């Protein structure tokens, strides 16, 4: 009996729950630093600021849901911009996104020692927090160069525990310390904060939503992106909004706004630690909340240790996600000739993009970390994130217009039908919100303005010089870096696409791909196409076909496990299988397609191997290896 027939009942990973848990593990980690950074600016209006930024985030989440389902590939806003506009806009989005990843690495690592200060107090303050953060970054960069994989199951478990802990803090806080009159006394309209500070606090509060780009990377491993991605993003948006809607009220009840002897308003939630900083909890706001939650004795001591260890662990994982994200976006940019190909080269032994890890995830992140200024780091994230989000919103609006007649699997809402186009209201309003927020950061904060605009100026100057002198191609043209030849090609086959079907040759193709992957240290994307009849919409439910498709993907994973190869399954919906396979190969930047050919040859227009295989051979953007039966060959 064939090997794949023996493997049944495998767990189907990266459905909606797995995507939600993994994404929340990255987005939800920001509560451990965003609360203090925002409260230092917004004071008593911190909950209002988080609600406004949450609405902007909801619009941004809808934009990323639609864009990611349309183009399920790593790159996020950069990928959307490439398809909607041109390579220059794509580079700008990617360069801003690179800044986001660098800042995410820096700020997450910076706060790891803050929460470990429950074991050694000096870790709360400079220089020990800077030293500790730099050690965390260096360790994770080295770990990723060696190529040790994350434990996905552990990440999901910690994300669930993290969300449950935050909900528990909210419940306990409402029971013990929540007082509406305290919250009303915290608010001093136009004074604490001033209106300019209130406006600045909104983009800074968006640091609470670090990691939304993670969904674009996860999309490559989603089983059915047309359904799983929108649902998981919606769940993340609701969960994060629920936490940021409630936890700041509790925090400001525990640490209310006061007036000092000089007439200045403050909350210890936003003050730096130590006697010179005011003895506040800006560096560990959730620990500050626990300490002022009304607990005592052994319960308080145990709660602080639990929250400190959990926060440090979650932030450590978020730092690692940022390191991986920085290397992925760098590799993608080099693949599209936006950066030199040296950043795309893999380590000869570990087969990882070591130079991009060292330069961007390591050196650049530590450079932002060294001053030890958390306010500057937070505002730099707002600069990059607001710009990247604005490009994503504009790209979705442009795609709706340019490809208004194109049939799509998923379309976010609400929309307004006008002149034959379904205009995305969420993207229009979200783009206005993030665009205005970006301008507020640029206008109001001089250090961020100079550093952020300098980052963009350096990036575009380098891109122009590189494109004109070395690539010798127009700036707006999309160009893929050629595959290397000779011995280096062995390292390049790290992204293999295998279409699977009920045919026996499909199993032979999976076997062949697994042998190739085992030799090269590659990853395999197994895809199965559900061909939807023309009379039905693309997102129509076809339960029997979907069930069989998922069984085939699980069987492909079983074959991969027998070779020690990681196989990711993807269910595609399309009118024609050949077109869907070629489109997926283009989206994933596939280096080689391994496809099984039918045993029998149908005479006439079906060609040598059959319609699907012949179409892939003719239109594939990469090399194609055919696992053909003797008769077909």
Image (cartoon, rainbow, N blue to C red):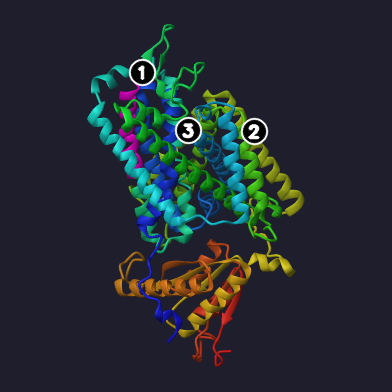
State whether the magenta stretch is mostly helix, strand or loop.
helix
SS at mark 2 in the image: helix
Quarter of the picture containing the N terminus is bottom left
Q: Residues within 10 Å of mark 3 (few under 14, many from 20)?
A: few
Q: Position of residue 555 (x, y in %)?
A: 42, 75
Does the magenta segment cover residue 72? no
Residue at the spot x=59%, y=42% of the render? 137
Instruction: Return the residue at label 3.
Output: 119
Q: Horizontal placement of 361 versus 279: left or right? A: right
Task: Answer whether labels 3 and 2 touch (C-beta < 8 Å).
Answer: no
> What x and y, as percent, mark residue 397?
44, 48
Mark pair 1, 3: CA separation? 29 Å
Q: Which mark is residue 454?
A: 2
**Residue 277 against residue 431 in the figure, above or below:** above
Magenta run includes residue 240: yes
Circle 1 or circle 3, nearest the eye: 3
Question: Where residue 480 is drawn, which disc sits there?
Answer: none
Q: Quadrant of the C terminus?
A: bottom right
Q: Is residue 334 visible?
A: yes
* Horizontal relation, residue 342 to residue 123: left or right: right
Looking at the picture, tell me which residue is in the foreground, 117 or 356: 117
Residue named by callout 1: 257
Give the residues drawn in magenta, as a range.
238-256
Q: Residue furthest right?
A: 469
In the picture, measured across the screen, residue 473 lies left or right of residue 626, that is right
């Amino acid at each position: 009996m064939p090997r794949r027939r023996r493997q049944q009942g495998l767990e189907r990973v990266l459905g909606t729950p797995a995507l939600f848990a993994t994404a929340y593990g990255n987005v939800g980690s920001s509560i451990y630093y965003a609360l203090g950074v925002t409260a230092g600016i917004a004071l008593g209006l911190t909950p209002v600021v988080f609600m406004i930024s949450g609405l902007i985030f909801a619009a941004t989440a809808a934009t990323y849901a639609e864009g990611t389902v349309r183009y399920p590939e790593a790159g996020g806003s950069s990928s959307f911009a490439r398809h909607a506009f041109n390579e220059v806009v794509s580079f700008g989005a990617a360069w801003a996104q690179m800044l986001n990843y660098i800042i995410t690495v820096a700020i997450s690592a910076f706060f790891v020692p803050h929460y470990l200060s429950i074991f050694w107090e000096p870790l709360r303050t400079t220089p020990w927090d800077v030293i500790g953060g730099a050690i965390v970054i260096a360790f994770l960069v080295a770990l990723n160069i060696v190529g040790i994989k994350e434990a996905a199951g552990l990440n999901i478990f910690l994300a669930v525990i993290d969300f449950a802990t935050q909900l528990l803090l909210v419940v306990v806080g409402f029971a013990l310390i929540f007082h509406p009159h305290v919250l009303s006394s915290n608010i001093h309209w136009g004074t604490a904060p001033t209106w300019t500070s209130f406006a600045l606090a909104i983009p800074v509060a968006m640091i609470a939503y670090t990691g939304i780009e993670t969904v674009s990377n996860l999309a490559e491993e989603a089983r059915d992106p047309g359904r799983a991605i929108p649902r998981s993003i919606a769940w993340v948006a609701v969960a994060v909004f629920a936490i940021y809607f409630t936890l700041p009220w509790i925090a400001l009840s525990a640490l209310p706004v006061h007036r000092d002897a000089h007439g200045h308003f403050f909350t210890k939630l936003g003050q730096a630690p130590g006697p010179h900083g005011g003895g506040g909890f800006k560096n560990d706001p959730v620990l500050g909340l626990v300490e002022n939650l009304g607990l005592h004795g052994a319960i308080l001591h145990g709660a602080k240790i639990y929250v400190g260890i959990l926060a440090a662990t979650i932030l450590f994982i978020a730092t690692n996600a940022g390191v991986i994200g920085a290397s992925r976006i760098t590799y993608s940019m080099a693949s599209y000739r936006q950066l030199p190909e040296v950043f795309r080269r893999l380590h000869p032994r570990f087969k990882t993009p070591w130079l991009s890890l060292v330069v961007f995830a390591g050196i650049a992140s530590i450079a932002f970390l060294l001053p030890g200024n958390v306010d500057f780091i937070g505002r730099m994230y707002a600069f990059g994130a607001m710009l990247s989000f604005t490009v994503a919103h504009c790209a979705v609006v442009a795609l709706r217009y340019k490809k208004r007649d194109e049939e799509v699997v998923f379309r976010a809402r609400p929309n307004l039908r006008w002149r034959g186009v379904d205009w995305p209201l969420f993207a229009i309003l979200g783009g206005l919100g993030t665009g205005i927020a970006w301008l507020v950061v640029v206008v109001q904060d001089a250090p961020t303005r100079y550093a952020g605009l300098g980052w963009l100026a350096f990036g575009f100057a380098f891109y122009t010089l590189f494109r004109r002198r070395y690539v010798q191609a127009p700036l707006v043209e999309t160009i893929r870096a050629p595959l290397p030849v000779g011995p280096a090609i062995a390292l390049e086959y790290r992204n293999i696409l295998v279409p699977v079907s009920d045919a026996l040759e499909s199993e032979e193709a999976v076997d062949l791909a697994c042998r190739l992957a085992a030799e090269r240290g590659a990853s395999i994307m197994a895809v199965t196409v559900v061909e939807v009849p023309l009379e039905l919409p693309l997102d129509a439910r076809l339960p029997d076909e979907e069930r069989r498709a998922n069984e085939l993907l699980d069987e492909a994973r079983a074959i991969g496990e027998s070779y020690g190869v990681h196989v990711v399954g993807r269910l595609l919906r399309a009118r024609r299988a050949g077109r869907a396979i070629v489109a997926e190969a283009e989206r994933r930047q596939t280096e080689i397609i391994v496809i099984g050919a039918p045993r029998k040859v149908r005479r006439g227009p079906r060609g040598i191997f059959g319609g699907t295989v012949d179409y892939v051979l003719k239109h594939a953007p990469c090399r194609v290896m055919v696992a053909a039966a003797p008769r077909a060959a």
